[in-house]
Image: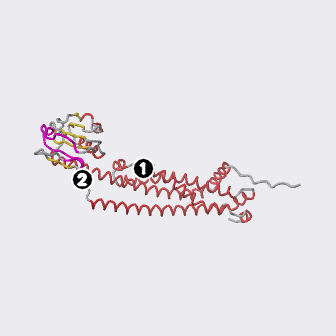
């Protein structure tokens, strides 16, 4: 009687997952070695990315603070001490972050009040502390004021400066942006340009420094990831060597080559996910602590950008999983191609 040869049964994915978890528990030492390699590699990657973000943030915050102090010094040089004084404000558009922080700095300098007047529909006095703002008309912004500030991203204000500065304590107009034109046709007015324009050579030097830093960072990241892949691949190959007889037994029991490959890829994915998550968190925390010890904690906290760090963390996790899968390609194929009899005769 003829009997048809039955096709081998393809085991479901859940069975492979259970086998992988059991293998990880049995070979916990080898699994920890592989996991440690992923953690260290991804932690190094996350540390570089976090340090780069913090360095930019610290430099940006340091430059902003220096710029704000310089603006305040320029204003004080024209008006004298601002404590207890009144300042007029002409807002011609949306205030920038620097302008808002400059207002905060003036408030900390104990400016008594602001005579605020908005020229554009998107001008708002909400950037000023409620107790310090008095909405004024076009001709009252200079009433008892030591200076009139022009802020916002709009064009030059259309103000009758002669009428506006007539009741002022001092005829000083401070322009926070270079697009604001100084008052014309008014005698005895001191104009202070608070915004500093970078020279072309400074812009070129900053761009060159950014390119050099980007190249060095990219090269370091490539080397670190290459070392990580080699470490993971080596650990996976050692795992294959230790499991010669196990692989041979599974093949003798009917396991297909795809099932063997599936196990190794699944194991590498689990290792990559766990190691990447731990490495991302470790790298970010370590870098933040190091920067906090080097710089002031308040400077680091103000320089942090949670959204950017979250993006770097997601990128590191994806990179770790991809690297783990790439590193498992050769060991998985090597294990799946093993001849059962040869694997069972192994003494390793």
**For residue 166, which quarter of the picture?**
top left
The residue lying toward the viewer, choosing from 248 and 196, is: 196
Image coordinates of residue 83 in percent, x first then y, are 18, 41
Q: Tell me which residue sits at (30%, 52%) in the image.
A: 62
Q: Indicate whether residue 165 is drawn in magenta.
A: yes
Q: Residues within 10 Å of mark 2 (few under 14, many from 20)?
A: few
**For residue 269, which quarter of the picture?**
bottom right
Where 227 falls versus 123 (above or below)? below
Tags 2 and 1 touching, CB below 8 Å: no
Where does label 2 land, which residue?
Answer: 196
Where 159 falls versus 13 (above or below)? above
Q: Quadrant of the N terminus?
A: bottom right
Where does label 1 land, which residue?
Answer: 308
Name the N-terminal-most of marks 2 and 1.
Answer: 2
The residue lying toward the viewer, choosing from 67 and 150, is: 150
Q: Main secondary structure of the magenta part?
A: loop
Which residue is the extreme one toward the right?
Answer: 1
Position of 132 with respect to 299 (left or right) is left
* Cα distance in 3D space between marks 2 and 1: 28 Å
Position of 329 with respect to 12 (left or right) is left
Q: Indicate whether residue 64 is drawn in magenta.
A: no
Q: Residue 93 bears which disc, if any?
A: none
Where 259 falls versus 146 (above or below)? below
Q: Residues within 10 Å of mark 1 (few under 14, many from 20)?
A: few
At mark 2, the secondary structure is loop
**For residue 334, which quarter of the picture?**
bottom right
Q: Tell me which residue sits at (29%, 50%) in the image.
A: 64
Image coordinates of residue 49 in percent, x first then y, are 43, 55
Magenta span: 156-181
Image coordinates of residue 58 in percent, x first then y, are 34, 53
Q: Nearer the viewer, mark 2 or mark 1?
A: 2
């Amino acid at each position: 009687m003829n009997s048809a040869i039955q096709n081998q049964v393809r085991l479901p994915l859940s069975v492979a997952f259970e086998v992988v978890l059991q293998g990880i528990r049995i070979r916990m030492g080898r699994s920890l070695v592989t996991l440690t390699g992923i953690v260290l590699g991804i932690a190094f990657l996350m540390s570089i990315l976090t340090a780069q973000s913090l360095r930019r943030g610290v430099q940006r915050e340091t430059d902003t603070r220096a710029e704000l102090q310089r603006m305040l010094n320029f204003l004080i040089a024209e008006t004298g001490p601002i404590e207890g004084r009144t300042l007029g404000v002409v807002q011609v558009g949306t205030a920038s972050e620097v302008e808002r922080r400059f207002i905060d700095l003036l408030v900390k300098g104990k400016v008594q009040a602001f005579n605020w007047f908005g020229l554009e529909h998107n001008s708002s006095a909400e950037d000023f502390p409620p107790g310090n703002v008095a909405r004024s008309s076009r001709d009252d912004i200079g009433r008892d004021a030591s200076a009139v500030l022009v802020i916002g991203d709009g064009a030059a204000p259309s103000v009758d400066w002669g009428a506006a500065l007539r009741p002022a304590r001092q005829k000083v107009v401070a322009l926070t942006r270079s697009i604001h034109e100084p008052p014309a046709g008014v005698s005895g007015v001191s104009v202070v340009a608070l915004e500093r324009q970078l020279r072309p050579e400074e812009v070129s030097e900053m761009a060159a420094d950014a390119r050099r830093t980007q190249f060095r960072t990219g090269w370091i990241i490539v080397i670190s990831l290459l070392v990580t892949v080699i470490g993971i691949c080596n650990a996976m190959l050692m795992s294959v060597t230790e499991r010669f007889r196990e692989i041979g037994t599974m093949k003798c029991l009917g396991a297909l080559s795809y099932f063997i490959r599936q196990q190794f890829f699944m194991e590498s994915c689990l290792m990559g996910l766990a190691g990447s998550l731990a490495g991302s968190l470790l790298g970010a925390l370590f870098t933040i602590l190091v920067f906090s010890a080097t710089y002031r904690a308040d400077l680091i906290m103000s320089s942090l950008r949670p959204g950017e760090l979250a993006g770097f963390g997601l990128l590191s996790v994806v990179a770790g999983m991809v690297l783990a899968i790439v590193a498992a390609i050769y060991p998985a194929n090597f294990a799946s191609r093993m001849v059962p009899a040869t694997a069972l005769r192994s003494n390793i």
